């Protein structure tokens, strides 16, 4: 199973980002129900190992906290083209600690995770691999108007272990286990 661990966005905050993506008029908006802040991408993991990860995450019990999304950034490119996201800025110490603890629990369950710098963000749009001149102009206008967008006081209420199911219409994220923050 393809899986990851994330903080889901509350629906009201996710809808703000989805509305912003709809104003982009280039690429594809990420549906609000798919918006999340990834703590660890696990990749393809056998179901038995995912059960071990879920058991390890049960002892997490981190404190609840809030974070702020600010400033549109481009991530990628990847196999589906670049993405636009709002970055977490500033990064709260509680988020850094949670990220470290999640990775530690994954390692304890026997998973080997990619080593990459933690750049917390929430993706709100996926762009085509190549933009036409018209799309490039639309993107530039969007960034002029929306580039400094921010969403304050987003509550982190739970950590979720998700399965990522890839479809022709985009990924579908199914919660496998949820772990409330204290």
Image (cartoon, grey):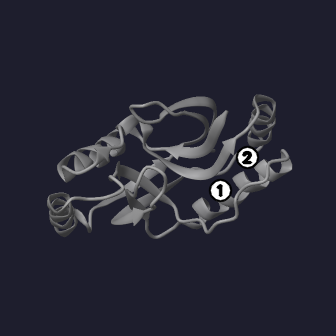
**At numbered mark 2, what does the secondary structure look like: helix, strand or loop?**
loop
Measured as percent of width and height from the top left, residue 60 is found at 73, 46
Few, some or many residues within 10 Å of mark 1 (<14, 14–19, 20+) = some
Residue 121, percent from left and from top: 46, 59
Q: x, y percentage for residue 129?
A: 36, 56
Q: Is residue 180 something one can see in this rendering?
A: no
Q: Which mark is residue 98?
A: 1
Q: Which residue is mark 2?
A: 60
| 91 relative position to 71: left or right | right
Would you call the spot at circle 2 few (<14 residues within 10 Å), some (14-19), or many (20 or more)?
Answer: some
**Depth check: 13 or 135 in front?**
135
Place of residue 114 in the rendered image (x, y in percent of width and height, measured from the top left) = 70, 59
Task: Examine the rendered structure and indicate whether residue 37 appears above or below residue 76.
Answer: above
Q: Is residue 30 left or right of residue 4?
A: left
User: Which residue is depicted at the point 57% across and 46% down?
Assistant: 6
Q: Is residue 121 visible?
A: yes
Determine whether, in the image, residue 89 is placed left or right of residue 12: right
38 in relation to 174, above or below: below
Q: Quadrant of the N terminus?
A: top right
Mark closest to the chain's N terminus, 2 or 1: 2
SS of the residue under disc 1? helix
Residue 9 or residue 41, whichever sits in front: 41
Quadrant in which residue 178 is drawn: top right
Q: Nearer the viewer, residue 131 or 7?
A: 131
Q: Residue at x 27, y 62 (%)?
A: 149
Circles 2 and 1, Cβ within 8 Å, touching? The answer is yes
User: From the viewer's perspective, is 15 left or right of 41?
Assistant: left
**Disc assigned to residue 8:** none
């Amino acid at each position: 199973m393809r899986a990851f661990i994330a903080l889901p966005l509350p629906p009201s905050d996710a809808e703000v980002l989805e509305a912003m993506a709809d104003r982009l008029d280039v690429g594809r908006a990420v549906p609000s129900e798919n918006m999340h802040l990834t703590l660890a991408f696990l990749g393809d993991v056998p179901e038995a190992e995912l059960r071990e990860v879920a058991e390890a995450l049960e002892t997490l019990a981190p404190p609840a906290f809030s974070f702020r999304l600010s400033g549109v950034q481009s991530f990628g490119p990847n196999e589906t083209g670049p993405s636009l996201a709002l970055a977490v800025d500033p990064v709260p110490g509680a988020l850094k600690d949670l990220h470290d603890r999640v990775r530690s629990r994954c390692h304890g369950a026997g998973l080997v995770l990619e080593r990459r710098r933690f750049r917390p963000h929430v993706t709100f749009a996926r762009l085509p691999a190549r933009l036409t001149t018209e799309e490039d102009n639309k993107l530039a206008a969007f960034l002029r108007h929306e580039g400094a967008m921010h969403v304050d006081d987003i509550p982190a209420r739970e950590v979720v272990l998700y399965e990522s199911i890839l479809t022709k219409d985009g990924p579908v994220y199914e919660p496998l286990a949820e772990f409330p923050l204290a």
